[in-house]
Amino acid sequence: MRFHRSGVVALVVLGSVVGCSLTDEPTPPAVHHTEAAYRPGAPGIGDPDFPDDGNGGYDVAHYDLDVDYTPATRRLEGVATIRAAATQGLSSFNLDLAGLDVRKVSLDGKSATFSRRGDELTVRPERPIDANDEFTVEVTYDGVPNPAKDTGNLGTFGFMPTSDGAFVASEPDGSKTWFPSNDHPADKATYAFEITVPAGLTALANGEQVGQPKTAGGKTTFRWRERHPMATYLATATLGKFELRQGKTASGIPTLAATDPAFKSGLDRLYTSTAEITDHWAKVFGPYPFSSTGGVIDNYTAGYALENQTKPLYGGFDPDEVIVAHELAHQWFGNSLTIWRWKDLWLNEGFATYAEWMWSEHKGRKTVEEFFTEFNNRPDSDPMWSYPPGRAKPDDLFNQSVYTRGGMALHALRKAIGDETFFKLLRTWAAEHRYGHVTTEKFIDLAERMSGKDLNPLFDAWLFQPRKPAA
């Protein structure tokens, strides 16, 4: 995530593991055929900062999303087929869904009863689900999606209608505005998308396109598949009129760039910079974790970019290389390595901000040390110093400190352990947790193990104290 302000490149807040539960506790053995073995799945996944996000009692393995959207009426018709496994005996379980009307729910092909309360869709199977059993739930729904609004964070996010389609950027918890899900990054899954739109429009989603679009009855259906685990907030179904350019990076990674016609002049630049930066980060951070790379510019003034997996999305502006470098660094830090709790967001944004500085230095512009010194010269009264980035606040997740001070913490670490160990640490971090989940504690443990140093004072000063670290 990076925010954009017209005319300003602000470094301020511009911005296979399948489904894991929020604790490291092993799944208890199943107890069958007794009433006491079954209980409702929790309505939240266990993140105290976002208690209503996600759900307990199961892990999702895969989403099949069949979506038909008509821009003229803003009406969405959807069928979500979700494959999951119970982590406890379930008498019922919840899915996250905001607004929209649920028409039918089935479980393993049999009709299931359901109820709605707020953003919770509660499903009650005909017979309870045993712990460790796999099941498939299918939800048929429709209506006019309403994007999420949170003035303390991004403002507007989720499924956002445009004049010719929709701009879909869901961080932190806007996926529930367009499909039922376990809407928290602690539960990752693979995805298949079948998106139908009026003929003449293009539908873009994560991963790679499957076959050619098919047109019938004035509508065109596009199929996409993301075969690697993905957090819900990274899923997209952005659609409208787009100019496309496709090819491969110099190292052979399939690349797709798409722009709204209003930004057609930036198509080649987006394609070229995306390809070049993806290949460069693969040398710095380790192999690119996904099967394709790309970027999408839509004519919707969101004021930010989002690192949607394989297809970062730029909301109403032509991004420069710095912003592209930020969003593509997220493909490693945030997308492949996904935070377990939102409070650890600096592991996404601090790393991507540091990548911006490294890209600048790589291109012969301002060095990382110059960025660090410039920010470190801010007075003690600067608000950045009073916000400890290692504990992102739920009502102010995307604070400047999470980005800038988070990036500074990495540079302080680099100076403490040396370049050779630091860059080996980044590659090891990306490799050891590829497609998995990470926490700040895990990063500190790895940094100490690889450096042989006690780094707790350094991390405490840079991440957890509400004051400027001592020089």
Image (tube, helix red, strand yellow):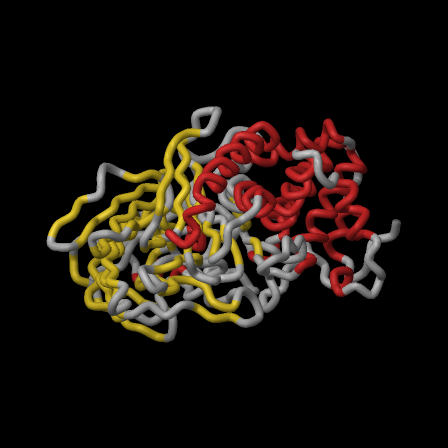
Q: Residue furthest bottom?
A: 117
Which quadrant would residue 161 be assigned to in this image? bottom left
Q: Nearer the viewer, residue 50 or 304?
A: 304
Q: Nearer the viewer, residue 83 or 165?
A: 165
Q: Residue furthest front?
A: 265
Q: Is residue 146 above or below residue 130?
A: below
Q: Name the side, left or right, on which 349 lies relative to 196.
A: right
Q: Nearer the viewer, residue 441 or 28?
A: 441
Q: Residue at x 54, y 51 (%)?
A: 340
Q: Is residue 39 visible?
A: no
Q: Residue furthest right?
A: 471
Q: Position of residue 334 (x, y in %)?
A: 53, 46
Q: Position of residue 459 (x, y in %)?
A: 75, 48
Q: Name the side, left or right, on which 161 lies relative to 397.
A: left
Q: Is residue 370 above or below residue 201?
A: above
Q: Position of residue 121 (x, y in %)?
A: 32, 67
Q: Is residue 32 visible?
A: yes
Q: Is residue 349 above or below residue 246?
A: below
Q: Residue at x 54, y 46 (%)?
A: 327
Q: Residue at x 41, y 41 (%)?
A: 257
Q: Residue at x 39, y 45 (%)?
A: 258
Q: Name the side, left or right, on which 240 lies relative to 384.
A: left
Q: Name the side, left or right, on which 125 lies relative to 318.
A: left
Q: Position of residue 307 (x, y in %)?
A: 49, 49
Q: Residue furthest top?
A: 251
